[in-house]
Amino acid sequence: MPDTATQLAYSPAIAALIDAAPADDVGHGAPNEAARARLAALDDATMWPGRRVTDRELAQACRSALWLRHHFLNESHQISQDIATATGSFWHGIMHRREGDFGNAKYWFHRVGRHPVLGSLAATLRGQSTDADDAAVIERLTVGGSWDCDRFVDLCEATIRRRGNATALCLKLQDAEWRELFDYCYRAAVSP
């Protein structure tokens, strides 16, 4: 479900793409071909009308994220693998987790280091669930006040391989992770 409070800061084109995203998938998902042309046509002026991009790598991270949101894993990967920053590694790790390459996902998450989104995501998620079982899982994933990417990879792997029944929780957490990281990238890509 779109977070309209956050989307008010997004350009109309970005808000529309987020609204049009297909249902999330813990795995690959089927690419949303209806969005391909709009994703391919994104440029700075469309993404940040009237603003100047000051961080090219974060702008590219936003593009990678949007391709990923619409289940275009290859296109997302082509962009994220060329972003040599912690944020690029974060998107790269998410993409590999989604494609089911869990060891590679962990490799990229280790390159993320102490990214500011890890703490803010943990803060967002802690205490958010009213279900006791979900709250216990979230507690294990937010060790020391920081989101634990490796533990989330393990949970998604178990869910995908049907060794767990946490699909709904994985989707909820993955959505929160995507939104938190995308929002960080989108806001920091342009000058204030």
Image: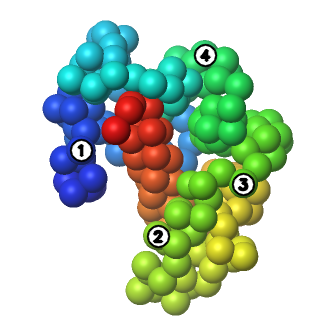
Where does label 1 land, which residue?
9
Rendered image quadrant of residue 17: top left
Sequence-wise first label, 3 or 2 = 3
**Secondary element at tag 2:** helix
Sequence-wise first label, 1 or 3 = 1
Nearest to the eye among marks 2 and 1: give it.
1
CB under 8 Å between discs 1 and 3: no
x and y, in percent, of residue 128 in the image: 43, 79
Tell me the residue at 66%/67% (across/down): 146
Asked whether residue 158 is in view, the answer is no
x and y, in percent, of residue 72 in the image: 48, 24
Sequence-wise first label, 2 or 1 = 1
Which quadrant holds the C terminus?
top left
Question: What is the CA distance from the residue labelled 4 to the residue labelled 1?
Answer: 27 Å
Sequence-wise first label, 4 or 3 = 4
Which quadrant holds the N terminus?
bottom left
Where does label 4 land, which residue?
78
